């Protein structure tokens, strides 16, 4: 029975959903995460290890040593960076660190890919060399370089900070004053006040060390492609794609945030681009790729890689589209049969993301509402955390409406439960 360790540093729900899916295909799953993480609500975990934001590498090394996993799956970009850093440190220890190095290599693929997958501009150059369609991208080192870029590329343009995720480090700008302001913010280390607030209120210590060490981000600029966003997630092994999911983004939390409604698609150019990059980088494990599908041509432009699982890794959609089954199969050396599709619908309403965005969204009823009914603790935490986030975004005179909004959400969930029971 394969043993898999999931690592999460932020309080994000998808790693918990992936843990459930991996367990359903016969894997033993351990996790390392901060206290009160959605993973901690699951009844199916074998062991839960605590992630300490002020001693991250120690946390991960201890968890890997105790779990002795066959594969490690990072749930966010910081987890990936920690593992790459741990790999370099253990590699310097020679034989004493070889066991940890081997499992990290098995989980990501060739270590030559490690410095590339979260260096946006370098990755884009490699993709272009492989014949993959990409927007022009360049590292911006100064305000003067930014001015030169915008004079050549025009507006709108997209600025991105390396090492960020979930839209936090991406800004689309429409004029130079806006670009200069966004560049300064993306380049600057996290403010100590922001790091302290996130640590105390959200129990998220991931910004503490970058703030203390005054780390400045690498910022790249990318030509804006007008069109629809799309995303791919693949399970791969030693440079070969085992299973893959491709989606068009229908709704998002906000302009730069994560998707909340997606539609399953087949796009040959996306498939070809993903296969070329997986082969070039000799990747293993789970990796995501983001695209823009150009409005007037339908061409797919690769815009970045996510060296980790994303929101859709748990969706089991039949042969060739079941990532958990593909990983279990390659780890056991035997065929693991994909389960039947969870739905014949092609539109997926991600829970709790879409009803947090809009409790009255029509997609909650028309799409496949992806709710973790089988884990009540996770379901409850999803609701509580989402309502808390919504409350922070409301003016004080609107917060009194939250009980009504919670009631409407509860009614929708009850109706969905009744519908599921009747089906």
Image (spheres, rainbow, N blue to C red):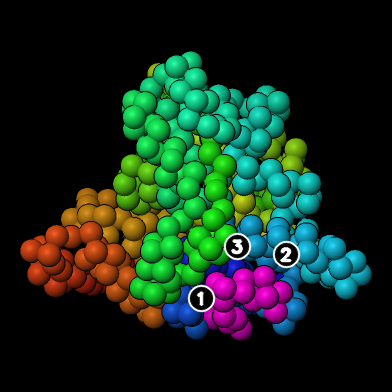
Q: Check disc 1 and report its element: helix, strand or loop.
A: loop
Are discs 1 and 2 less than 8 Å apart at CB? Answer: no
Q: Where is residue 214? Give x, y as percent.
A: 54, 56
Residue at horizontal 37 percent and vertical 68 percent from the top:
197
Mark 2 and mark 3: Cα distance apart in space:
10 Å
Residue 407 image label: none
Q: Crowdedness of circle 2 by 10 Å Cα count: few (<14), some, many (20+)? A: many
Residue 61 in the magenta stretch? The answer is yes
Q: Where is residue 221? Give x, y as percent.
A: 51, 31
Residue 234 in the magenta stretch? The answer is no
Depth check: 44 or 62 in front?
62
Residue at horizontal 46 percent and vertical 56 percent from the top:
190
Counting residues from the N terminus, which is met first, the one under dot 2 or under dot 3? 3
The residue at which mark 3 appears reads as 79
Depth check, mark 2 against mark 3: the one in front is: 2
Are discs 2 and 3 less than 8 Å apart at CB? Answer: no
Is 46 placed above or below 384 here? below
Q: Crowdedness of circle 1 by 10 Å Cα count: few (<14), some, many (20+)? A: many
The residue at which mark 2 appears reads as 86
* Whether residue 17 is visible: no
Q: Where is residue 211? Give x, y as percent.
A: 50, 60
The residue at which mark 1 appears reads as 34
Which range is magenta? 44-62
Q: Residue furthest top?
A: 152
Residue at horizontal 33 percent and vertical 42 percent from the top:
255
Q: Where is residue 291? Give x, y as percent.
A: 50, 35
Q: Residue furthest right?
A: 95
Depth check: 75 or 408 in front?
75
Quadrant where the image shows the N terminus: bottom right
Q: Check disc 3 and report its element: helix, strand or loop.
A: helix
């Amino acid at each position: 029975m394969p043993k898999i360790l999931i690592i999460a540093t932020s309080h994000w729900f998808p790693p918990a959903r992936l843990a459930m899916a991996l367990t359903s295909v016969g894997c033993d799953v351990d996790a390392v995460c901060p206290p009160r993480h959605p993973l901690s609500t699951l009844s199916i975990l074998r062991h839960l290890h605590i992630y300490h934001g002020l001693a991250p590498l120690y946390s991960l090394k201890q968890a890997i040593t105790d779990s002795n996993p066959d594969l490690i799956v990072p749930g966010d970009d910081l987890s990936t960076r920690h593992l790459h850093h741990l790999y370099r440190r253990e590699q310097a220890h020679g034989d004493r660190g070889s066991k940890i190095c081997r499992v990290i290599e098995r989980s990501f693929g060739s270590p030559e890919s490690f410095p590339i997958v979260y260096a946006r501009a370098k990755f884009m150059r490699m993709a272009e060399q492989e014949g993959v369609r990409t927007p022009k991208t360049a590292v911006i080192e100064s305000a003067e370089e930014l001015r030169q870029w915008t004079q050549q590329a025009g507006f709108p343009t997209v600025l991105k900070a390396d090492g960020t995720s979930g839209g936090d480090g991406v800004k689309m700008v429409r004029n130079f004053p806006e670009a200069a302001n966004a560049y300064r913010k993306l380049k600057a280390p996290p403010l100590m006040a922001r790091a302290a607030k996130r640590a105390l209120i959200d129990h998220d210590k991931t910004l503490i060390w970058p703030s203390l060490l005054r780390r400045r981000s690498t910022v790249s600029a990318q030509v804006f492609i007008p069109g629809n966003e799309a995303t791919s997630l693949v399970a791969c092994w030693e440079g070969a794609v085992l299973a893959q999911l491709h989606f068009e983004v229908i709704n998002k939390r906000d302009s730069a945030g994560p998707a909340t409604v997606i539609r399953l698609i087949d796009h040959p150019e996306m498939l070809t681009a993903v296969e070329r990059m997986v082969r070039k980088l000799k990747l293993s494990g789970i990796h995501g790729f983001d695209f823009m599908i150009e409005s007037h041509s339908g061409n797919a432009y690769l815009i970045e890689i996510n060296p980790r699982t994303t929101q859709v890794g748990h969706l089991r959609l039949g042969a060739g589209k079941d990532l958990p089954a593909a990983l279990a199969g390659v780890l056991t050396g035997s065929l693991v049969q994909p389960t039947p599709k969870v739905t014949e619908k092609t539109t997926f309403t991600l829970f709790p993301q879409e009803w947090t965005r809009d409790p009255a969204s029509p997609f909650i009823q028309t799409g496949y509402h992806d709710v973790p009914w089988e884990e009540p603790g996770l379901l409850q935490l999803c609701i509580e955390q989402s309502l808390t986030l919504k409350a922070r975004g409301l003016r004080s005179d609107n917060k009194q409406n939250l009980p009504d909004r919670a009631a409407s959400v509860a009614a929708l969930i009850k109706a969905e439960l009744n519908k599921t029971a009747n089906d």
